[in-house]
Image (tube, rainbow, N blue to C red):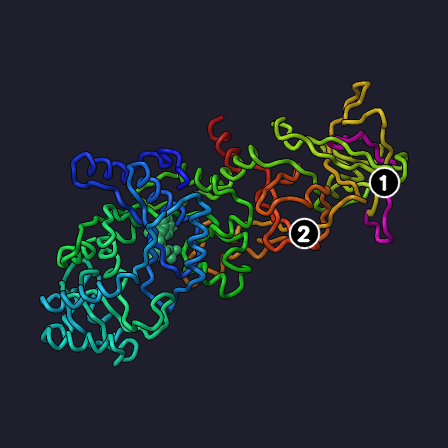
Amino acid sequence: MNELPSNIENSNFIRDIIGNDLRDGLCEKVVTRFPPEPNGYLHIGHAKSIYLNFGVAQDFSGRCHLRFDDTNPTREEQEYIDAIKTDIQWLGLDWGDHLYYASDYFEQLYDWAVHLIQIGKAYVDDLTADEIRDYRGTLTEPGRNSPHRDRPAKESLSLFSRMRKGDFPNGQRVVRAKIDMASGNINLRDPIMYRIIHSTHPRTANNWCIYPTYDFAHGQSDSIEHVSHSICTLEFEDHRPLYDWFIENLPVPSRPHQYEFARLNLSYTILSKRALTQLVRENHVSGWNDPRMPTLSGMRRRGFPSEAIREFVKRIGVAKNNSVVDTAILEHCVRDFLNQHAERRMAVLRPLKVIIENYPDGKTENLDAPNNPAKEEVGTRKLPFSREIYIEQDDFMEEPPKKFFRLAPEREVRLRYGYLITCTDVKKDPNGEIIELRAQYDPATKGGNAPDGRKVKGTLHWVSAPHAIDAEVHLFEHLFTDSEPRSDGDLLKGINPSSLEILRDCKLEPSLGNLDKGQTVQFERKGYFCTDTDSTSDRMLFNRTIGLRDSWSKAQSGKTG
Ligand code: ATP
Ligand code: MG
Protein backbone atom coordinates (compact mmCIF):
# COMPACT_ATOMS: atom_id res chain seq x y z
CA MET A 1 0.00 0.00 0.00
CA ASN A 2 1.05 3.48 -0.83
CA GLU A 3 1.54 5.05 2.58
CA LEU A 4 -0.17 8.33 3.18
CA PRO A 5 2.02 10.78 4.99
CA SER A 6 0.93 10.69 8.59
CA ASN A 7 -1.59 13.34 9.56
CA ILE A 8 -2.62 13.92 5.98
CA GLU A 9 -5.72 15.49 7.45
CA ASN A 10 -5.14 18.23 9.90
CA SER A 11 -6.68 17.25 13.17
CA ASN A 12 -10.44 17.47 12.95
CA PHE A 13 -13.50 16.57 14.99
CA ILE A 14 -13.84 13.10 13.44
CA ARG A 15 -10.26 12.30 14.28
CA ASP A 16 -10.90 13.51 17.83
CA ILE A 17 -13.96 11.27 18.17
CA ILE A 18 -12.02 8.23 16.99
CA GLY A 19 -9.07 9.04 19.24
CA ASN A 20 -11.41 9.31 22.23
CA ASP A 21 -13.22 6.06 21.35
CA LEU A 22 -9.90 4.23 21.26
CA ARG A 23 -8.75 5.78 24.50
CA ASP A 24 -12.05 4.96 26.23
CA GLY A 25 -12.05 1.39 24.96
CA LEU A 26 -15.24 1.90 22.93
CA CYS A 27 -13.49 0.67 19.83
CA GLU A 28 -10.71 -1.87 19.41
CA LYS A 29 -9.95 -1.57 15.74
CA VAL A 30 -10.68 1.43 13.55
CA VAL A 31 -12.50 0.34 10.41
CA THR A 32 -13.87 2.91 7.97
CA ARG A 33 -15.26 2.57 4.47
CA PHE A 34 -15.75 4.63 1.36
CA PRO A 35 -19.16 3.67 -0.06
CA PRO A 36 -19.73 5.03 -3.58
CA GLU A 37 -22.84 4.23 -5.53
CA PRO A 38 -21.61 3.14 -8.99
CA ASN A 39 -23.96 5.49 -10.82
CA GLY A 40 -21.38 7.99 -12.05
CA TYR A 41 -17.72 8.93 -11.88
CA LEU A 42 -16.06 10.27 -8.76
CA HIS A 43 -15.69 14.02 -8.33
CA ILE A 44 -13.40 16.06 -6.12
CA GLY A 45 -15.98 16.01 -3.32
CA HIS A 46 -15.53 12.26 -3.18
CA ALA A 47 -11.76 12.80 -2.89
CA LYS A 48 -12.42 14.65 0.35
CA SER A 49 -14.36 11.69 1.71
CA ILE A 50 -11.77 9.20 0.40
CA TYR A 51 -8.80 10.93 2.01
CA LEU A 52 -10.74 11.34 5.25
CA ASN A 53 -11.74 7.68 5.43
CA PHE A 54 -8.44 6.20 4.30
CA GLY A 55 -6.47 8.83 6.22
CA VAL A 56 -8.01 8.23 9.66
CA ALA A 57 -7.88 4.46 9.17
CA GLN A 58 -4.18 4.64 8.44
CA ASP A 59 -3.38 7.06 11.23
CA PHE A 60 -5.06 4.83 13.79
CA SER A 61 -3.57 1.60 12.35
CA GLY A 62 -6.95 0.48 11.13
CA ARG A 63 -8.25 -0.27 7.66
CA CYS A 64 -10.54 1.31 5.12
CA HIS A 65 -12.90 -0.69 2.90
CA LEU A 66 -14.08 0.15 -0.55
CA ARG A 67 -17.72 -0.82 -0.69
CA PHE A 68 -19.89 -0.29 -3.72
CA ASP A 69 -23.36 0.70 -2.64
CA ASP A 70 -24.99 -1.11 -5.55
CA THR A 71 -28.62 -1.23 -4.49
CA ASN A 72 -30.29 0.44 -7.46
CA PRO A 73 -29.65 -1.45 -10.71
CA THR A 74 -31.52 1.08 -12.85
CA ARG A 75 -28.71 3.59 -12.48
CA GLU A 76 -25.63 1.49 -11.89
CA GLU A 77 -23.10 0.17 -14.38
CA GLN A 78 -19.87 -1.82 -14.49
CA GLU A 79 -18.21 1.10 -16.30
CA TYR A 80 -18.67 3.19 -13.16
CA ILE A 81 -17.33 0.46 -10.89
CA ASP A 82 -14.16 0.26 -12.98
CA ALA A 83 -13.75 4.03 -13.20
CA ILE A 84 -14.16 4.46 -9.44
CA LYS A 85 -11.43 1.91 -8.74
CA THR A 86 -9.08 3.58 -11.19
CA ASP A 87 -9.67 6.99 -9.61
CA ILE A 88 -9.05 5.81 -6.06
CA GLN A 89 -5.82 4.14 -7.12
CA TRP A 90 -4.79 7.32 -8.89
CA LEU A 91 -5.24 9.17 -5.60
CA GLY A 92 -2.57 6.83 -4.24
CA LEU A 93 -4.82 4.67 -2.07
CA ASP A 94 -5.27 0.95 -1.82
CA TRP A 95 -8.16 -0.99 -0.27
CA GLY A 96 -6.08 -4.17 -0.28
CA ASP A 97 -8.31 -7.23 0.17
CA HIS A 98 -11.18 -5.11 1.40
CA LEU A 99 -13.30 -4.67 -1.69
CA TYR A 100 -16.99 -5.24 -1.00
CA TYR A 101 -20.38 -4.76 -2.58
CA ALA A 102 -23.71 -4.21 -0.85
CA SER A 103 -24.99 -6.81 -3.31
CA ASP A 104 -22.79 -9.39 -1.52
CA TYR A 105 -25.22 -9.01 1.37
CA PHE A 106 -28.54 -9.26 -0.49
CA GLU A 107 -29.38 -12.69 0.92
CA GLN A 108 -28.53 -11.62 4.48
CA LEU A 109 -30.46 -8.38 4.12
CA TYR A 110 -33.46 -10.32 2.86
CA ASP A 111 -33.30 -12.58 5.90
CA TRP A 112 -33.14 -9.57 8.19
CA ALA A 113 -36.18 -8.04 6.51
CA VAL A 114 -38.01 -11.34 7.10
CA HIS A 115 -36.91 -11.18 10.72
CA LEU A 116 -38.36 -7.69 11.19
CA ILE A 117 -41.66 -8.79 9.66
CA GLN A 118 -41.74 -11.81 11.95
CA ILE A 119 -41.28 -9.72 15.09
CA GLY A 120 -43.94 -7.26 13.95
CA LYS A 121 -41.53 -4.45 13.07
CA ALA A 122 -41.99 -4.41 9.31
CA TYR A 123 -44.82 -5.06 6.84
CA VAL A 124 -45.64 -5.25 3.18
CA ASP A 125 -47.56 -2.24 1.98
CA ASP A 126 -49.77 -2.14 -1.11
CA LEU A 127 -50.08 1.65 -1.32
CA THR A 128 -48.77 3.29 -4.48
CA ALA A 129 -45.76 5.61 -4.34
CA ASP A 130 -48.10 8.63 -4.55
CA GLU A 131 -50.29 7.34 -1.75
CA ILE A 132 -47.29 6.64 0.44
CA ARG A 133 -46.10 10.20 -0.08
CA ASP A 134 -49.55 11.48 0.72
CA TYR A 135 -49.84 9.40 3.91
CA ARG A 136 -46.40 10.47 5.05
CA GLY A 137 -47.53 13.92 6.21
CA THR A 138 -45.32 17.00 6.26
CA LEU A 139 -42.83 18.69 8.53
CA THR A 140 -45.71 20.28 10.41
CA GLU A 141 -48.32 17.50 10.16
CA PRO A 142 -47.99 13.92 11.33
CA GLY A 143 -48.44 11.10 8.85
CA ARG A 144 -51.24 8.53 8.79
CA ASN A 145 -50.97 4.79 9.14
CA SER A 146 -51.27 2.75 5.99
CA PRO A 147 -54.38 0.52 5.94
CA HIS A 148 -51.99 -2.43 5.49
CA ARG A 149 -49.82 -1.57 8.47
CA ASP A 150 -51.43 -4.08 10.78
CA ARG A 151 -51.89 -6.95 8.37
CA PRO A 152 -50.76 -10.24 9.95
CA ALA A 153 -47.03 -11.02 9.75
CA LYS A 154 -47.90 -14.22 7.94
CA GLU A 155 -49.61 -12.33 5.15
CA SER A 156 -46.68 -9.91 4.82
CA LEU A 157 -44.22 -12.80 4.74
CA SER A 158 -46.13 -14.51 1.98
CA LEU A 159 -46.36 -11.30 -0.04
CA PHE A 160 -42.66 -10.53 0.51
CA SER A 161 -41.73 -13.98 -0.75
CA ARG A 162 -43.94 -13.43 -3.81
CA MET A 163 -42.30 -10.03 -4.35
CA ARG A 164 -38.99 -11.83 -4.46
CA LYS A 165 -40.30 -14.42 -6.89
CA GLY A 166 -41.33 -11.70 -9.32
CA ASP A 167 -45.10 -12.03 -8.99
CA PHE A 168 -45.63 -8.28 -9.02
CA PRO A 169 -44.66 -5.41 -11.33
CA ASN A 170 -42.45 -2.49 -10.30
CA GLY A 171 -43.97 -0.26 -7.67
CA GLN A 172 -46.90 -2.52 -6.76
CA ARG A 173 -45.70 -3.31 -3.24
CA VAL A 174 -42.96 -2.30 -0.84
CA VAL A 175 -41.68 -3.47 2.52
CA ARG A 176 -41.74 -0.79 5.21
CA ALA A 177 -40.33 -0.66 8.70
CA LYS A 178 -43.04 -0.20 11.31
CA ILE A 179 -41.73 2.68 13.40
CA ASP A 180 -43.85 5.79 13.98
CA MET A 181 -46.00 7.67 11.48
CA ALA A 182 -46.16 10.63 13.87
CA SER A 183 -42.44 10.95 14.40
CA GLY A 184 -41.01 14.45 14.14
CA ASN A 185 -38.31 12.90 11.97
CA ILE A 186 -39.91 12.03 8.65
CA ASN A 187 -37.27 9.36 8.05
CA LEU A 188 -38.85 7.38 10.89
CA ARG A 189 -42.37 7.43 9.41
CA ASP A 190 -42.36 3.81 8.31
CA PRO A 191 -39.47 4.11 5.84
CA ILE A 192 -39.27 1.84 2.82
CA MET A 193 -36.86 -1.09 3.15
CA TYR A 194 -37.47 -2.94 -0.11
CA ARG A 195 -38.88 -2.02 -3.48
CA ILE A 196 -39.57 -4.00 -6.65
CA ILE A 197 -37.22 -3.20 -9.53
CA HIS A 198 -37.24 -5.53 -12.51
CA SER A 199 -33.87 -4.63 -13.91
CA THR A 200 -30.58 -6.41 -14.60
CA HIS A 201 -27.98 -5.75 -11.92
CA PRO A 202 -24.30 -5.41 -12.95
CA ARG A 203 -23.30 -8.14 -10.48
CA THR A 204 -26.33 -10.19 -9.50
CA ALA A 205 -27.84 -10.08 -13.01
CA ASN A 206 -31.47 -11.20 -12.74
CA ASN A 207 -31.22 -13.07 -9.44
CA TRP A 208 -33.23 -10.37 -7.73
CA CYS A 209 -36.15 -8.17 -8.62
CA ILE A 210 -36.44 -6.62 -5.16
CA TYR A 211 -33.72 -4.34 -3.84
CA PRO A 212 -33.01 -2.90 -0.39
CA THR A 213 -33.04 0.88 -0.03
CA TYR A 214 -29.93 2.80 0.97
CA ASP A 215 -31.28 3.15 4.51
CA PHE A 216 -31.89 -0.56 4.93
CA ALA A 217 -28.62 -1.63 3.32
CA HIS A 218 -26.09 0.82 4.62
CA GLY A 219 -25.86 0.34 8.37
CA GLN A 220 -26.25 -3.43 8.10
CA SER A 221 -23.47 -3.59 5.51
CA ASP A 222 -21.31 -1.56 7.88
CA SER A 223 -22.10 -4.01 10.63
CA ILE A 224 -21.31 -7.09 8.55
CA GLU A 225 -17.91 -5.58 7.75
CA HIS A 226 -17.32 -4.55 11.37
CA VAL A 227 -17.01 -0.92 10.39
CA SER A 228 -16.43 1.06 13.57
CA HIS A 229 -16.90 4.60 12.28
CA SER A 230 -19.29 5.13 9.39
CA ILE A 231 -18.45 8.59 8.12
CA CYS A 232 -20.85 10.30 5.74
CA THR A 233 -22.00 13.76 4.70
CA LEU A 234 -24.36 16.03 6.63
CA GLU A 235 -27.48 15.28 4.60
CA PHE A 236 -27.54 11.90 6.35
CA GLU A 237 -27.70 13.39 9.83
CA ASP A 238 -31.49 13.02 9.89
CA HIS A 239 -31.11 9.40 8.82
CA ARG A 240 -28.95 8.51 11.80
CA PRO A 241 -31.88 7.61 14.10
CA LEU A 242 -33.06 5.19 11.43
CA TYR A 243 -29.54 3.81 10.99
CA ASP A 244 -29.51 3.16 14.74
CA TRP A 245 -33.04 1.74 14.76
CA PHE A 246 -32.16 -1.01 12.30
CA ILE A 247 -28.95 -1.83 14.16
CA GLU A 248 -30.83 -2.03 17.48
CA ASN A 249 -33.66 -4.15 16.13
CA LEU A 250 -31.64 -6.68 14.15
CA PRO A 251 -29.34 -9.51 15.28
CA VAL A 252 -26.36 -7.85 13.58
CA PRO A 253 -22.76 -8.89 14.30
CA SER A 254 -21.41 -5.48 15.35
CA ARG A 255 -22.56 -2.02 16.26
CA PRO A 256 -21.19 0.68 13.95
CA HIS A 257 -21.77 4.39 14.54
CA GLN A 258 -22.47 7.05 11.98
CA TYR A 259 -20.75 10.46 11.97
CA GLU A 260 -21.42 13.31 9.58
CA PHE A 261 -19.19 16.00 8.11
CA ALA A 262 -19.81 18.83 5.65
CA ARG A 263 -19.65 17.94 1.99
CA LEU A 264 -17.32 19.85 -0.27
CA ASN A 265 -18.84 22.51 -2.49
CA LEU A 266 -16.59 24.28 -4.95
CA SER A 267 -17.28 27.61 -6.64
CA TYR A 268 -17.99 27.78 -10.40
CA THR A 269 -18.72 24.09 -10.60
CA ILE A 270 -21.14 21.52 -9.32
CA LEU A 271 -20.47 18.47 -7.20
CA SER A 272 -23.59 16.43 -7.66
CA LYS A 273 -23.55 13.24 -9.64
CA ARG A 274 -27.09 13.84 -10.80
CA ALA A 275 -26.16 17.22 -12.28
CA LEU A 276 -22.91 15.89 -13.75
CA THR A 277 -24.83 13.00 -15.33
CA GLN A 278 -27.09 15.54 -16.97
CA LEU A 279 -24.13 17.46 -18.39
CA VAL A 280 -22.76 14.23 -19.87
CA ARG A 281 -26.07 12.83 -21.16
CA GLU A 282 -27.05 16.11 -22.83
CA ASN A 283 -23.61 16.58 -24.35
CA HIS A 284 -22.77 19.84 -22.64
CA VAL A 285 -19.34 18.27 -22.12
CA SER A 286 -17.54 15.56 -24.08
CA GLY A 287 -17.89 12.96 -21.32
CA TRP A 288 -17.26 12.26 -17.65
CA ASN A 289 -13.56 12.90 -18.21
CA ASP A 290 -13.97 16.16 -20.09
CA PRO A 291 -11.10 18.31 -18.74
CA ARG A 292 -13.61 20.95 -17.57
CA MET A 293 -15.45 18.49 -15.35
CA PRO A 294 -14.84 18.46 -11.57
CA THR A 295 -14.45 14.69 -11.80
CA LEU A 296 -11.18 13.04 -10.85
CA SER A 297 -10.93 11.58 -14.35
CA GLY A 298 -11.49 15.03 -15.87
CA MET A 299 -8.86 16.58 -13.62
CA ARG A 300 -6.39 13.81 -14.43
CA ARG A 301 -6.96 14.31 -18.16
CA ARG A 302 -6.47 18.01 -17.71
CA GLY A 303 -3.11 17.43 -16.04
CA PHE A 304 -3.95 18.05 -12.37
CA PRO A 305 -1.49 15.99 -10.30
CA SER A 306 -3.11 13.83 -7.63
CA GLU A 307 -0.60 15.29 -5.14
CA ALA A 308 -2.21 18.70 -5.66
CA ILE A 309 -5.66 17.27 -4.97
CA ARG A 310 -4.36 15.69 -1.79
CA GLU A 311 -2.82 18.98 -0.69
CA PHE A 312 -6.08 20.79 -1.46
CA VAL A 313 -8.12 18.35 0.63
CA LYS A 314 -5.65 18.75 3.46
CA ARG A 315 -5.89 22.52 3.34
CA ILE A 316 -9.67 22.77 3.39
CA GLY A 317 -9.98 20.46 6.39
CA VAL A 318 -13.08 18.74 7.71
CA ALA A 319 -15.87 20.69 9.35
CA LYS A 320 -19.46 20.29 10.40
CA ASN A 321 -21.00 23.26 8.59
CA ASN A 322 -21.55 23.54 4.87
CA SER A 323 -19.70 26.18 2.88
CA VAL A 324 -18.47 26.85 -0.63
CA VAL A 325 -14.73 26.58 -1.18
CA ASP A 326 -13.11 28.96 -3.67
CA THR A 327 -11.95 27.05 -6.76
CA ALA A 328 -8.91 29.35 -6.77
CA ILE A 329 -7.59 27.39 -3.76
CA LEU A 330 -7.58 24.17 -5.78
CA GLU A 331 -5.96 25.98 -8.69
CA HIS A 332 -3.36 27.40 -6.36
CA CYS A 333 -2.45 23.89 -5.15
CA VAL A 334 -2.15 22.66 -8.74
CA ARG A 335 0.02 25.61 -9.76
CA ASP A 336 2.17 25.32 -6.69
CA PHE A 337 2.92 21.66 -7.33
CA LEU A 338 3.55 22.15 -11.03
CA ASN A 339 5.74 25.17 -10.47
CA GLN A 340 8.06 22.91 -8.50
CA HIS A 341 7.82 19.79 -10.63
CA ALA A 342 6.95 20.65 -14.23
CA GLU A 343 9.71 21.00 -16.80
CA ARG A 344 9.77 24.08 -18.99
CA ARG A 345 9.23 24.00 -22.74
CA MET A 346 8.62 26.48 -25.55
CA ALA A 347 5.37 26.65 -27.50
CA VAL A 348 3.72 29.40 -29.50
CA LEU A 349 -0.05 29.30 -29.31
CA ARG A 350 -0.96 32.05 -31.82
CA PRO A 351 1.99 32.13 -34.19
CA LEU A 352 3.47 35.08 -36.06
CA LYS A 353 6.41 34.30 -38.33
CA VAL A 354 9.64 36.25 -38.01
CA ILE A 355 12.35 35.96 -40.68
CA ILE A 356 15.80 36.84 -39.42
CA GLU A 357 17.27 38.19 -42.62
CA ASN A 358 20.94 38.19 -41.64
CA TYR A 359 20.89 34.61 -40.29
CA PRO A 360 22.29 32.11 -42.81
CA ASP A 361 19.65 30.22 -44.79
CA GLY A 362 19.65 26.50 -44.01
CA LYS A 363 21.72 26.82 -40.84
CA THR A 364 20.51 25.25 -37.57
CA GLU A 365 22.06 25.83 -34.17
CA ASN A 366 21.17 23.62 -31.24
CA LEU A 367 20.97 25.92 -28.25
CA ASP A 368 21.04 24.69 -24.67
CA ALA A 369 17.85 25.36 -22.77
CA PRO A 370 17.42 24.50 -19.09
CA ASN A 371 14.51 22.18 -18.30
CA ASN A 372 13.85 24.20 -15.19
CA PRO A 373 15.88 27.38 -14.60
CA ALA A 374 15.24 27.10 -10.86
CA LYS A 375 16.45 23.47 -10.69
CA GLU A 376 19.77 22.84 -12.32
CA GLU A 377 19.60 19.12 -11.54
CA VAL A 378 16.86 18.46 -14.09
CA GLY A 379 19.33 19.28 -16.87
CA THR A 380 19.05 20.90 -20.25
CA ARG A 381 17.73 20.04 -23.68
CA LYS A 382 18.65 21.09 -27.20
CA LEU A 383 16.52 23.78 -28.74
CA PRO A 384 16.93 24.29 -32.51
CA PHE A 385 17.32 27.84 -33.76
CA SER A 386 17.11 28.88 -37.41
CA ARG A 387 16.42 31.77 -39.77
CA GLU A 388 12.64 31.47 -39.47
CA ILE A 389 10.95 31.43 -36.12
CA TYR A 390 7.50 31.91 -34.62
CA ILE A 391 6.63 34.29 -31.84
CA GLU A 392 3.20 35.02 -30.28
CA GLN A 393 1.04 37.46 -32.21
CA ASP A 394 0.45 39.51 -29.10
CA ASP A 395 4.18 39.85 -28.46
CA PHE A 396 4.31 42.34 -31.34
CA MET A 397 2.64 45.73 -31.71
CA GLU A 398 3.13 48.08 -34.60
CA GLU A 399 2.32 51.12 -32.49
CA PRO A 400 3.09 50.07 -28.95
CA PRO A 401 1.75 51.97 -25.95
CA LYS A 402 4.23 53.17 -23.37
CA LYS A 403 4.45 50.12 -21.14
CA PHE A 404 4.64 47.53 -23.91
CA PHE A 405 8.18 46.14 -23.72
CA ARG A 406 7.91 43.38 -26.30
CA LEU A 407 8.64 43.56 -30.01
CA ALA A 408 7.83 46.63 -32.12
CA PRO A 409 9.33 48.21 -35.26
CA GLU A 410 13.00 49.14 -34.75
CA ARG A 411 12.88 47.67 -31.25
CA GLU A 412 15.27 45.05 -29.89
CA VAL A 413 14.10 42.08 -27.74
CA ARG A 414 15.67 38.95 -26.34
CA LEU A 415 14.70 35.52 -27.64
CA ARG A 416 14.84 33.33 -24.56
CA TYR A 417 18.04 31.20 -24.56
CA GLY A 418 18.73 32.59 -28.06
CA TYR A 419 19.82 35.95 -29.48
CA LEU A 420 18.79 39.57 -29.43
CA ILE A 421 16.79 40.52 -32.50
CA THR A 422 15.56 43.86 -33.84
CA CYS A 423 12.40 44.17 -35.93
CA THR A 424 13.17 45.78 -39.28
CA ASP A 425 9.99 45.39 -41.33
CA VAL A 426 6.33 44.41 -41.12
CA LYS A 427 4.59 42.48 -43.93
CA LYS A 428 0.82 42.70 -44.32
CA ASP A 429 -1.84 41.07 -46.45
CA PRO A 430 -4.17 43.13 -48.66
CA ASN A 431 -6.55 43.56 -45.71
CA GLY A 432 -3.84 45.15 -43.64
CA GLU A 433 -3.41 42.13 -41.35
CA ILE A 434 0.15 41.54 -40.19
CA ILE A 435 1.36 38.23 -41.65
CA GLU A 436 5.12 38.27 -41.13
CA LEU A 437 7.93 40.26 -39.55
CA ARG A 438 11.47 40.77 -40.70
CA ALA A 439 14.32 41.12 -38.24
CA GLN A 440 18.10 41.27 -37.81
CA TYR A 441 19.94 39.36 -35.11
CA ASP A 442 23.15 40.27 -33.32
CA PRO A 443 25.52 37.27 -33.60
CA ALA A 444 27.45 38.49 -30.55
CA THR A 445 24.47 37.95 -28.24
CA LYS A 446 24.22 34.14 -28.18
CA GLY A 447 22.49 33.02 -24.98
CA GLY A 448 20.59 36.30 -24.88
CA ASN A 449 23.10 38.71 -23.40
CA ALA A 450 24.67 41.72 -25.06
CA PRO A 451 28.47 41.93 -24.48
CA ASP A 452 28.27 45.73 -24.29
CA GLY A 453 25.70 45.45 -21.51
CA ARG A 454 23.02 47.37 -23.41
CA LYS A 455 19.55 47.14 -21.89
CA VAL A 456 16.91 44.97 -23.50
CA LYS A 457 13.69 44.80 -21.56
CA GLY A 458 11.55 42.26 -23.34
CA THR A 459 12.18 38.50 -23.43
CA LEU A 460 10.04 36.42 -25.75
CA HIS A 461 9.50 32.70 -26.13
CA TRP A 462 9.77 31.37 -29.68
CA VAL A 463 9.92 28.21 -31.75
CA SER A 464 12.05 27.51 -34.84
CA ALA A 465 9.62 27.34 -37.77
CA PRO A 466 11.11 24.46 -39.81
CA HIS A 467 11.51 22.34 -36.67
CA ALA A 468 8.13 23.13 -35.11
CA ILE A 469 5.54 20.48 -34.37
CA ASP A 470 1.96 21.43 -35.19
CA ALA A 471 -0.54 20.99 -32.43
CA GLU A 472 -4.03 21.81 -31.33
CA VAL A 473 -4.34 23.32 -27.88
CA HIS A 474 -7.45 23.53 -25.72
CA LEU A 475 -7.85 26.34 -23.21
CA PHE A 476 -10.47 26.12 -20.47
CA GLU A 477 -12.49 28.49 -18.37
CA HIS A 478 -14.88 27.60 -15.56
CA LEU A 479 -17.74 25.41 -16.70
CA PHE A 480 -20.23 27.82 -15.10
CA THR A 481 -20.35 31.61 -15.13
CA ASP A 482 -22.27 31.54 -11.89
CA SER A 483 -20.04 31.11 -8.83
CA GLU A 484 -22.71 28.96 -7.16
CA PRO A 485 -24.54 27.17 -9.96
CA ARG A 486 -27.91 25.66 -9.10
CA SER A 487 -28.22 21.93 -9.35
CA ASP A 488 -31.98 22.05 -9.87
CA GLY A 489 -33.90 22.83 -13.06
CA ASP A 490 -31.85 25.95 -13.65
CA LEU A 491 -28.59 24.05 -13.97
CA LEU A 492 -28.15 24.82 -17.66
CA LYS A 493 -28.72 28.55 -17.24
CA GLY A 494 -25.40 28.99 -15.50
CA ILE A 495 -23.31 27.17 -18.12
CA ASN A 496 -20.41 29.21 -19.48
CA PRO A 497 -20.77 29.23 -23.28
CA SER A 498 -17.07 29.90 -23.75
CA SER A 499 -15.54 27.42 -21.32
CA LEU A 500 -13.56 25.79 -24.14
CA GLU A 501 -11.34 27.66 -26.60
CA ILE A 502 -9.70 25.63 -29.37
CA LEU A 503 -6.44 26.84 -30.93
CA ARG A 504 -5.66 24.81 -34.03
CA ASP A 505 -2.45 26.33 -35.30
CA CYS A 506 -0.02 26.08 -32.41
CA LYS A 507 3.72 25.53 -32.88
CA LEU A 508 5.73 23.46 -30.42
CA GLU A 509 9.43 22.91 -29.90
CA PRO A 510 10.36 19.44 -31.21
CA SER A 511 11.11 17.86 -27.82
CA LEU A 512 7.39 18.08 -27.03
CA GLY A 513 6.85 15.32 -29.56
CA ASN A 514 8.25 12.83 -27.02
CA LEU A 515 6.35 13.91 -23.97
CA ASP A 516 5.10 11.06 -21.78
CA LYS A 517 1.36 10.63 -21.56
CA GLY A 518 0.18 12.31 -18.41
CA GLN A 519 3.30 14.46 -18.03
CA THR A 520 2.46 18.10 -17.47
CA VAL A 521 4.98 20.78 -18.52
CA GLN A 522 5.12 24.53 -18.40
CA PHE A 523 4.94 26.29 -21.75
CA GLU A 524 7.04 29.29 -20.87
CA ARG A 525 4.94 32.42 -20.26
CA LYS A 526 1.75 30.51 -21.16
CA GLY A 527 0.92 28.16 -18.33
CA TYR A 528 0.96 24.42 -17.69
CA PHE A 529 -0.04 21.95 -20.37
CA CYS A 530 -0.27 18.20 -20.92
CA THR A 531 -1.10 15.95 -23.83
CA ASP A 532 -4.71 14.92 -24.07
CA THR A 533 -5.69 11.24 -23.99
CA ASP A 534 -6.82 11.62 -27.61
CA SER A 535 -3.47 13.03 -28.75
CA THR A 536 -1.60 11.02 -31.43
CA SER A 537 1.72 11.60 -33.15
CA ASP A 538 -0.20 12.67 -36.25
CA ARG A 539 -2.45 15.03 -34.43
CA MET A 540 -0.96 16.38 -31.24
CA LEU A 541 -3.52 17.71 -28.81
CA PHE A 542 -2.64 19.55 -25.60
CA ASN A 543 -4.81 20.71 -22.73
CA ARG A 544 -3.98 23.74 -20.71
CA THR A 545 -3.96 22.47 -17.15
CA ILE A 546 -3.84 25.95 -15.69
CA GLY A 547 -2.52 29.43 -16.46
CA LEU A 548 0.42 31.01 -14.66
CA ARG A 549 -1.39 33.80 -12.90
CA ASP A 550 -2.42 32.96 -9.39
CA SER A 551 -5.57 34.82 -8.41
CA TRP A 552 -5.65 33.09 -5.02
CA SER A 553 -2.22 34.01 -3.69
CA LYS A 554 -2.68 37.48 -5.19
CA ALA A 555 -5.90 37.92 -3.27
CA GLN A 556 -4.21 36.60 -0.13
CA SER A 557 -1.24 38.96 -0.38
CA GLY A 558 -3.68 41.79 -1.14
CA LYS A 559 -5.42 41.01 2.14
CA THR A 560 -2.32 40.92 4.26
CA GLY A 561 -0.47 43.78 2.77
P1 ATP B 1 -23.77 13.05 -5.27
O1 ATP B 1 -24.54 13.90 -4.30
O2 ATP B 1 -22.69 13.75 -6.00
O3 ATP B 1 -24.63 12.21 -6.15
P2 ATP B 1 -23.51 10.89 -3.54
O4 ATP B 1 -23.42 11.16 -2.10
O5 ATP B 1 -24.80 10.42 -4.03
O6 ATP B 1 -22.95 12.09 -4.35
P3 ATP B 1 -22.08 8.50 -3.33
O7 ATP B 1 -21.49 7.66 -4.39
O8 ATP B 1 -23.20 7.98 -2.55
O9 ATP B 1 -22.44 9.85 -4.02
O10 ATP B 1 -20.93 9.03 -2.37
C1 ATP B 1 -20.00 8.21 -1.78
C2 ATP B 1 -19.47 8.90 -0.56
O11 ATP B 1 -18.90 10.15 -0.91
C3 ATP B 1 -20.56 9.18 0.45
O12 ATP B 1 -20.09 8.81 1.72
C4 ATP B 1 -20.79 10.65 0.35
O13 ATP B 1 -21.19 11.16 1.59
C5 ATP B 1 -19.40 11.16 -0.08
N1 ATP B 1 -19.55 12.40 -0.84
C6 ATP B 1 -20.32 12.61 -1.92
N2 ATP B 1 -20.23 13.89 -2.33
C7 ATP B 1 -19.38 14.51 -1.49
C8 ATP B 1 -18.88 15.85 -1.37
N3 ATP B 1 -19.26 16.82 -2.22
N4 ATP B 1 -18.02 16.13 -0.37
C9 ATP B 1 -17.63 15.17 0.47
N5 ATP B 1 -18.06 13.90 0.43
C10 ATP B 1 -18.93 13.56 -0.53
MG1 MG C 1 -25.29 8.85 -2.13
Side of 68 relative to 30 (left or right): right
Q: Say whether residue 426 is magenta.
A: yes
The image quarter in which residue 364 lies: top right
Q: Does ligand 1 reach within 8 Å of label 2's beta carbon?
A: no
**Residue 443: x %, y % from top left:** 85, 27
Residue located at (87% from left, 33% from top): 440
Q: Which residue is mark 1?
A: 355
First in residue order: circle 2 vs circle 1: 1
Q: Hey, what amino acid is under mark 1? A: Ile
Q: Which residue is mark 2?
A: 540
Front-lying residue, 114 or 502:
114
Q: Is residue 255 above or below residue 282?
A: above
Classify mark 1: helix, strand or loop. Answer: strand
**Residue 544: x %, y % from top left:** 60, 46
Q: Is residue 19 above or below residue 135?
A: above
Q: CA distance from mark 2 to mark 1?
A: 25 Å
**Residue 167: x %, y % from top left:** 25, 81
**Residue 340: x %, y % from top left:** 55, 32
The image quarter in which residue 178 lies: bottom left
